[in-house]
C-alpha cells in the first residue's frame, strides 16, 4: 500500500514537471534581405539671374545703350521770325519779318529721363542777324534706340547787322548803330535715333516768343533830326513777336 502511494506521488510530480516546462520558442523566421531605399535624385534648380533679366530689359527699353551723363550736339536748320506779330511800341524797324538759315551748338547733362543744358544759336535772317543764348531742359522717353523729348528753352537774344533798308534813319546814321536785345522763350520737341552708344542723329523744332527792346539811337554831334525820325533818337522802342525753328542735329553722348 505504501509502495503504491509513493509511486503515485512520483508520477504526479513528473506530470507537473512536464506541464510546468515552458513550450520551446518557435524558431525565428529566416531573415529576408532588406534593400535600402534609393536616395532621392538631386534637384537641379535653374534660376535666371538678375543680370540676365536686366540685360534683356535694357535691350528692349533702350537698345542696350545704358545710362547717359553728358551730351554735346551741333544743329543746322531754318528759322522764321516776325518781330512785331504780337505788338510794337515806337519800334521804328521797317523790315520785321524774315527767314533764313540757323546754326547752333549745345551741351548739357542728363540724368535718366531729365536733361538740362545750354545752347547758342545764330539766326542768319535776310534783314538782320539774331543771336540766342539759351538755357534748355527736357523730359525724355526712350524705346529701344529711339529717344523723344518734350521741353522748353529760353534766354537772352540780341540783334545786329541790320540791312540798310531795315531801319528808317537820318541820312548820316548807319543802321548798324541800332542795337536790339531782349528775351526769347518757348517749347521744344525733339526726336533722336542712336546709331551707337556714343552717336545720335535727330531733328527738333521749337516755337518761341520774342520780347525785344530798342534803345534810343545816339544823335550824331552837331546834327539835327527831322520830326520824322525824332522818336528814333529820343525814345526807346519795344516789340513782342514770334519765331519758329526747325533743325537737324548730330549728337555725341557720354
Image: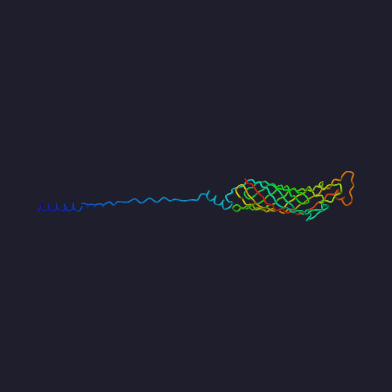
Could you tell me residue 55's position as x and y percent? 54, 50
Could you tell me residue 87's position as x and y percent? 80, 55
In this rendering, the count of numbered labels is 0
In front: 211, or 161?
Answer: 161
Could you tell me residue 95's position as x and y percent? 80, 53
In front: 89, or 177?
Answer: 177
Report whether 206 appears left or right of 143.
right
Could you tell me residue 184's position as x and y percent? 74, 51
Colour mode of the rendering: rainbow
Report whether 64 appears left or right of 40.
right
Report whether 48 appears left or right of 254.
left
Q: Quadrant of the N terminus?
A: bottom left
In front: 39, or 254?
Answer: 254
Q: Quadrant of the C terminus?
A: top right
Amino acid at each position: 500500500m505504501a509502495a503504491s502511494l509513493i509511486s503515485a506521488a512520483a508520477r504526479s510530480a513528473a506530470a507537473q514537471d512536464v506541464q510546468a516546462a515552458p513550450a520551446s520558442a518557435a524558431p525565428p523566421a529566416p531573415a529576408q534581405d532588406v534593400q535600402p531605399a534609393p536616395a532621392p535624385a538631386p534637384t537641379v534648380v535653374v534660376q535666371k539671374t538678375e543680370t540676365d533679366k536686366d540685360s534683356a530689359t535694357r535691350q528692349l527699353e533702350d537698345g542696350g545703350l545704358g545710362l547717359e551723363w553728358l551730351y554735346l550736339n551741333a544743329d543746322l536748320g531754318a528759322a522764321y521770325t516776325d518781330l512785331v506779330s504780337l505788338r510794337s511800341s515806337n519800334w521804328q524797324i521797317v523790315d520785321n519779318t524774315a527767314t533764313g538759315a540757323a546754326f547752333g551748338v549745345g551741351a548739357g547733362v542728363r540724368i535718366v529721363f531729365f536733361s538740362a543744358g545750354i545752347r547758342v544759336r545764330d539766326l542768319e535772317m535776310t534783314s538782320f542777324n539774331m543771336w540766342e543764348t539759351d538755357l534748355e531742359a527736357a523730359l525724355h522717353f526712350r524705346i529701344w534706340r529711339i529717344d523723344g523729348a518734350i521741353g522748353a528753352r529760353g534766354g537772352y537774344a540780341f540783334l545786329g547787322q541790320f540791312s540798310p533798308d531795315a531801319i528808317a534813319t537820318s541820312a548820316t546814321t548807319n543802321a548798324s548803330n541800332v542795337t536790339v536785345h531782349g528775351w526769347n522763350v518757348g517749347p521744344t520737341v525733339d526726336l533722336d535715333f542712336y546709331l551707337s552708344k556714343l552717336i545720335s542723329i535727330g531733328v527738333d523744332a521749337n516755337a518761341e516768343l520774342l520780347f525785344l527792346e530798342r534803345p534810343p539811337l545816339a544823335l550824331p554831334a552837331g546834327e539835327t533830326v527831322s520830326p520824322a525820325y525824332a522818336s528814333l533818337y529820343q525814345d526807346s522802342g519795344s516789340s513782342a513777336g514770334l519765331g519758329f525753328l526747325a533743325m537737324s542735329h548730330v549728337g555725341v553722348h557720354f
